[in-house]
C-alpha cells in the first residue's frame, strides 16, 4: 500500500514487547529488516525504528480517548517522555531521509519548534478541513468526541510499585469494552477505553488507581476491570525497557 501511494520516503515504527505482534527482539528485527529490504529494493527510501510495547506508549487506550490525547499533545498541554521521544525520533528519521536536515539534532530541534509554535497542530487542522472535517478540529476536540456514560477507577488488590505490565491484556480490556473488533462485523464503540494508565515504576495504592475505565455499562466495566488487574504485576523486580530499541536501515 505504501508503494502504491507513491511515497518517496518512509519510516516504519515496528513494535516489540508484550503488547506487540512481535514479542521478542529477534522477531521484531526480522520483520523490520524484511520490510526495509523490500521497500528499498522497490526504490522507496525506508528505515525503521523498533519501539517498546512492554507498557503502553501513552497512558491511555481507546479510540476517542487516544484522539483526545493526541490533541492535548499537539496543543502542548501534555508531553509524556516516551510519547515525545518516539514522536521526535520518527519525525527526525523522515526529515533526514528527505534531506531536509543533516543530522538528528537539527531535525529534532525543527520538530520541537513546530510543536511549541502550534504549527504542527495548525497543519493537522487544515488537513482535516480539506477532507471535509471541522476547521477547529483540535481547539474544540471535546465537542466532537462523545464521552462514555460510565467512568470509574480500578484499583490494584495490593499496594506497591508496578514492576511489569502485560500490555496485550490492556488491549483485550478495550476490546471487552467494545472499543475493538473480535470479528469484522463487530461495531466499535469509540467512547470506551482506558485512561490514566500507570506505567512501570509508578506506585499503585488506594489513592492512585491502575487506570480509569470508560465503559458503556456495568457488565463491560467488570470484565475490563478484571483484565486490567491481571495485566499488572505489583512488586517484584522492575525491569525498565527503553522506548526505542534499535534502528534498522542505511
Image (cartoon, rainbow, N blue to C red):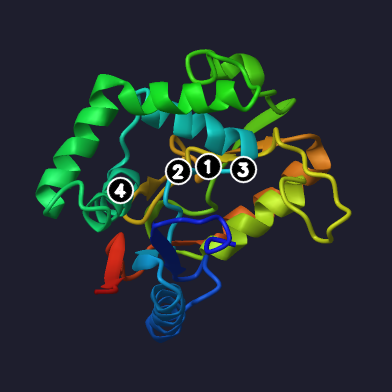
Earlier sequence position, callout 3 versus callout 1: 3
CA gap between label 1 and label 2 equals 9 Å
Q: Nearer the viewer, residue 175 or 222?
A: 175
Where disc 3 sits, the SS reads loop
Relative to residue 24, is residue 216 depicted above or below?
Answer: above
Relative to residue 63, is residue 29 depicted above or below?
Answer: below
Earlier sequence position, callout 2 versus callout 4: 2
Q: Which residue is mark 2?
A: 59
Earlier sequence position, callout 4 versus callout 1: 4
Q: Which residue is mark 1?
A: 211
Q: Are marks 4 and 1 in contact (CB under 8 Å)?
A: no
Q: Are marks 1 and 2 in contact (CB under 8 Å)?
A: yes
Q: Residues within 10 Å of mark 2 (few under 14, many from 20)?
A: some
Q: Nearer the viewer, residue 239 or 136?
A: 136
CA gap between label 2 and label 4 equals 21 Å
Q: Nearer the viewer, residue 53 or 173?
A: 53
> In this image, 126 relative to 76: left or right?
right
Q: Which residue is mark 3?
A: 62
Earlier sequence position, callout 1 versus callout 2: 2
> In the image, which is nearer the foreground, mark 2 or mark 3?
3
CA gap between label 4 and label 1 equals 30 Å
> In the image, which is nearer the foreground, mark 4 or mark 1?
4
Q: Residues within 10 Å of mark 4 (few under 14, many from 20)?
A: some
Where disc 1 sits, the SS reads strand
On the image, the x and y values in percent for residue 92 come to 24, 50
Q: Nearer the viewer, residue 207 or 99?
A: 99
Identify the residue at image location x=62%, y=43%: 62
CA gap between label 3 and label 4 equals 24 Å
The quadrant of the rendering that contains the N terminus is bottom right
The quadrant of the rendering that contains the C terminus is bottom left
Q: Which residue is mark 4?
A: 91
Amino acid at each position: 500500500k505504501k508503494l502504491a501511494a507513491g511515497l518517496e520516503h518512509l519510516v516504519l515504527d515496528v513494535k516489540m514487547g508484550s503488547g506487540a505482534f512481535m514479542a521478542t527482539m529477534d522477531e521484531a528485527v526480522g520483520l523490520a529488516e524484511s520490510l526495509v529490504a523490500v521497500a528499498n529494493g522497490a526504490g522507496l527510501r525506508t528505515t525503521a525504528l523498533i519501539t517498546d510495547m512492554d507498557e503502553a506508549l501513552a497512558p491511555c487506550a481507546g479510540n476517542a480517548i487516544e484522539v483526545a490525547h493526541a490533541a492535548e499533545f499537539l496543543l502542548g498541554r501534555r508531553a509524556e517522555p516516551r510519547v515525545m521521544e518516539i514522536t521526535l525520533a520518527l519525525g527526525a528519521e523522515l526529515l533526514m531521509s528527505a534531506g531536509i536536515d543533516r543530522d538528528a539534532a537539527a531535525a529534532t530541534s525543527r520538530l520541537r519548534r513546530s510543536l511549541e509554535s502550534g504549527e504542527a497542530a495548525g497543519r493537522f487542522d487544515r488537513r482535516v478541513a480539506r477532507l471535509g472535517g471541522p476547521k477547529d478540529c483540535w481547539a474544540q476536540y471535546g465537542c466532537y468526541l462523545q464521552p462514555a456514560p460510565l467512568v470509574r477507577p480500578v484499583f490494584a488488590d495490593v499496594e506497591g510499585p508496578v514492576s511489569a505490565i502485560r500490555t496485550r491484556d490492556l488491549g483485550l480490556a478495550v476490546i471487552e469494552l467494545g472499543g475493538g473488533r473480535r470479528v469484522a462485523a463487530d461495531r466499535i464503540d469509540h467512547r470506551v477505553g482506558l485512561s490514566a494508565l500507570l506505567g512501570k515504576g509508578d506506585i499503585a495504592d488506594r489513592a492512585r488507581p491502575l487506570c480509569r475505565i470508560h465503559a458503556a455499562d456495568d457488565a463491560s466495566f467488570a470484565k475490563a476491570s478484571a483484565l486490567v488487574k491481571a495485566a499488572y504485576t505489583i512488586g517484584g523486580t522492575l525491569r525498565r525497557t527503553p522506548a526505542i530499541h534499535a534502528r534498522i536501515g542505511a
